[in-house]
Image: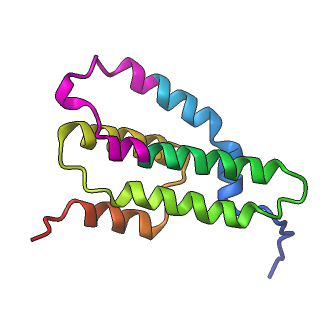
Amino acid sequence: MGEFATSRINRRALLFHSGSAAVASTVAATAHGTGSPGRDQEPSDRLRELIEAHRTAYAAFGKALHDTGGGDSDRASREEEKALLAICGYAAVEEGDRLAKARYLLEIEARGELDLPEHMQAVLRSTMWKG
């Protein structure tokens, strides 16, 4: 069997580097397809915090990848993944939260980064009634 030359770059790092074009096109398409949201369509403060935490973790992950040696990229990758799972698992009840969560996760999916079984499991669990 053939052998591959492997490097320290992992799948998420590769996706991070290749995702900017997909994000730009998705954001542009989303912007064209949405009108001005009404008051009841605004996301909650909690969901905004989760999204901002993921954006911050994603930026830290990108920085860790670009730093020489990338020694901290594994920790940064785990933090980014944890922040993304928090969004996936967020129970979006109000319309604004549902729209914001779906739009944000579609952006992540467009980069090819919403691909772990844990992502889908968290999203599906977040839709179940807890009684």
Q: Is residue 41 above or below residue 45?
A: above
For the N terminus, give its image quadrant: bottom right
Q: Quadrant of the C terminus?
A: bottom left
Residue at image position (65%, 61%) is: 77
In which quadrant of the rendered view does residue 17 lie?
A: top right
84 relative position to 43: left or right: right
Tell me where residue 72 appears, x and y as whole percent. Answer: 77, 62
Q: Is residue 94 magenta?
A: no
Here the colouring is rainbow
Seen at 83% across and 71% down, the residue is: 4
Residue placed most toward the observer, 89 or 7: 89
Residue farthest to the right?
Answer: 68
**Range of magenta residues:** 29-49
Occupied quadrant, residue 71: bottom right
Asked if residue 39 lies in the magenta stretch, the reply is: yes
**In this view, 113 is above or below 24:** below
Q: Which residue is at a point 50% across and 57% down the rendered structure image? A: 83
| Residue at x 68% of width, y 49% of height | 60
Relative to residue 38, is residue 103 drawn left or right? Answer: right
Percent x, y of residue 12: 65, 58
Q: Quadrant of residue 20?
A: top right
Query: Where does the image place residue 39, in percent across and percent down from the top left?
Result: 20, 24
State the count of labels.
0
In the rendered view, tell whether residue 1 sits above or below residue 11: below
Left or right of 54, for residue 92: left
